[in-house]
């Protein structure tokens, strides 16, 4: 699975890519609509999913598009990847949700815990092997890069310069100007602390470089929010948010915020996000069709409007790609890692963060 991350790094300079996921042609769309009408008659017109936060990766836009075009109500859900997995554990064998979306590390954990029903959506063969579980327990739909999301208006008011490097964030002038969400709750926040480990020379069994950096950063942290800090960051209450690059581009280009994205000079990592069919799903026919649709360029193009990079590169339009430019830094310095090895160390690294970083507050 190291190929997964290396492949993502290799793809970035090639945007826009000419590859096409062309399995959703006019004939396939007609068949999809017919199958969906049959499923609605059998299961109703509401699909429940977990971890569908409207401001994250354009889930709000995706759900509205699906409802408007296909007549299925797909409500938002404010759970994080971690709380989605916890809910599925608590609710089995009668879960409320039929589909679920995760940070890939958390989704892989959930699959190992038996929370998913294997399902290979239409167009399965078009998904690169490194972007799917061989048994169909999950597949990736897009990915982001850990970055500094910087509210420049708030930084100007604080008389601080835009940081360019991880080493900048621990300087005294950034006291009470930095935040990342609680990594025990939010999947992207876990990737933030994983990236801090990875770029400072840590490994799957040596957490010390990451924990030592995060301890140095700790005095400058405003909060470790359990909820997403998207809106506080946009409002300038959090001048520097360590999060997905796509969140910053969305604030800048869609919300009109005074926001810039920085890829730290020491490097960063990418993180895939995946979807799965919930075991014992209450509406399995609707869920399978929704997963079929999520593996189309049509769906991934709507996600890409929020600047998360689609697994089917043809879904990323030149117009969107042109806006994905950091103020400082480059996507050339992204660090590869092995996803299965990363998954194995998630719980232990979270525990180390709780004991050595969070409890210091």
Image (cartoon, grey):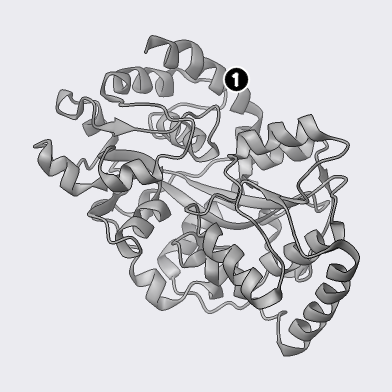
Number of numbered discs overlaid on the protein picture: 1
The image quadrant that residue 19 belongs to is bottom right
Quadrant housing residue 295: bottom right
- Residue name at image x 47 percent, y 28 percent: 182
Which of 246/90 is in front?
90
| Of 212 and 356, the residue lying toward us | 356
The residue indicated by pointer 1 is 348
Q: Is residue 334 left or right of residue 126?
A: left
Residue 221, percent from left and from top: 31, 25
Q: Residue furthest bottom?
A: 26
Q: Is residue 69 left or right of residue 232?
A: right
Q: Is residue 113 visible?
A: no
Q: Secondary structure at mark 1?
A: helix
Q: Is residue 318 above or below residue 94?
A: below
Dot 1 crowding, Cα within 10 Å, few <14, some 14–19, many 20+: few
Position of 5 with respect to 109 (left or right) is: left
Q: Which residue is found at the position 53% from the left and 35% from the top?
A: 186
Q: Is residue 180 above or below residue 235?
A: above
What x and y, as percent, mark residue 139?
A: 70, 55
Say above or below: 119 vs 358.
Answer: below
Q: Provide residue 79's location: percent of width, then percent of height.
A: 60, 40
Residue 183 seen in the figure: yes
Residue at 72% of width from left, 79% of height from top? 23
What is the quadrant of the C terminus in the image? top left
Left or right: residue 236 compared with residue 214: left
Name the outermost residue toward the right. Answer: 42
Place residue 20 in its image quadrant.
bottom right
Who is closer to the viewer here, 134 or 146? 146
Query: Which residue is more in the foreground, 154 or 320?
Result: 154
The percent position of residue 151, horizontal first and vertical second, equals: 24, 47
């Amino acid at each position: 699975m190291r190929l997964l991350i290396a492949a993502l790094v290799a793809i970035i300079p090639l945007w826009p890519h000419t590859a096409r996921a062309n399995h959703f042609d006019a004939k396939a769309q007609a068949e999809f609509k017919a199958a969906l009408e049959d499923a609605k008659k059998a299961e109703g017109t509401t699909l429940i999913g977990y971890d569908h936060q409207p401001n994250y990766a354009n889930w709000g836009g995706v759900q509205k598009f699906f409802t408007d075009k296909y007549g299925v109500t797909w409500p938002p859900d404010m759970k994080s990847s971690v709380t989605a997995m916890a809910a599925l554990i608590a609710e089995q064998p009668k879960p409320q949700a039929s589909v679920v979306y995760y940070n890939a590390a958390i989704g892989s954990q959930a699959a190992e815990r038996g929370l998913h029903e294997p399902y290979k959506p239409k167009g399965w063969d078009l998904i690169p092997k490194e972007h799917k579980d061989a048994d169909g327990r999950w597949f990736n739909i897009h990915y982001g890069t850990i970055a500094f999301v910087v509210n420049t208006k708030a930084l100007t008011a604080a008389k601080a310069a835009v940081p360019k490097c991880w080493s900048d964030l621990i300087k005294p002038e950034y006291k009470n100007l930095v935040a990342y969400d609680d990594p025990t709750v939010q999947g992207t926040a876990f990737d933030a602390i994983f990236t801090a480990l990875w770029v400072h020379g840590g490994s799957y069994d040596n957490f010390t470089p990451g924990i030592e950096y995060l301890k140095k950063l700790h005095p400058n942290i405003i909060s470790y929010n359990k909820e997403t800090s998207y809106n506080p960051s946009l409002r300038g209450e959090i001048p520097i948010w360590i999060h997905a690059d796509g969140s910053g581009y969305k604030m800048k280009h869609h919300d009109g915020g005074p926001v810039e994205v920085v890829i730290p000079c020491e490097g960063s990592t990418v993180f895939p996000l995946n979807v799965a069919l919930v075991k014992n799903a209450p509406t399995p026919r609707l869920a399978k069709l929704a997963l079929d649709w999520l593996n189309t360029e049509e769906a991934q193009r709507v996600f890409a409007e929020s600047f998360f990079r689609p697994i089917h590169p043809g879904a990323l339009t030149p117009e969107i790609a042109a806006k994905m430019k950091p103020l400082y830094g480059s996507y050339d310095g992204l660090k590869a890692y092995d996803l299965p090895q990363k998954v194995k160390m998630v719980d232990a690294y979270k525990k180390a963060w709780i004991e050595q970083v969070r409890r210091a507050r």
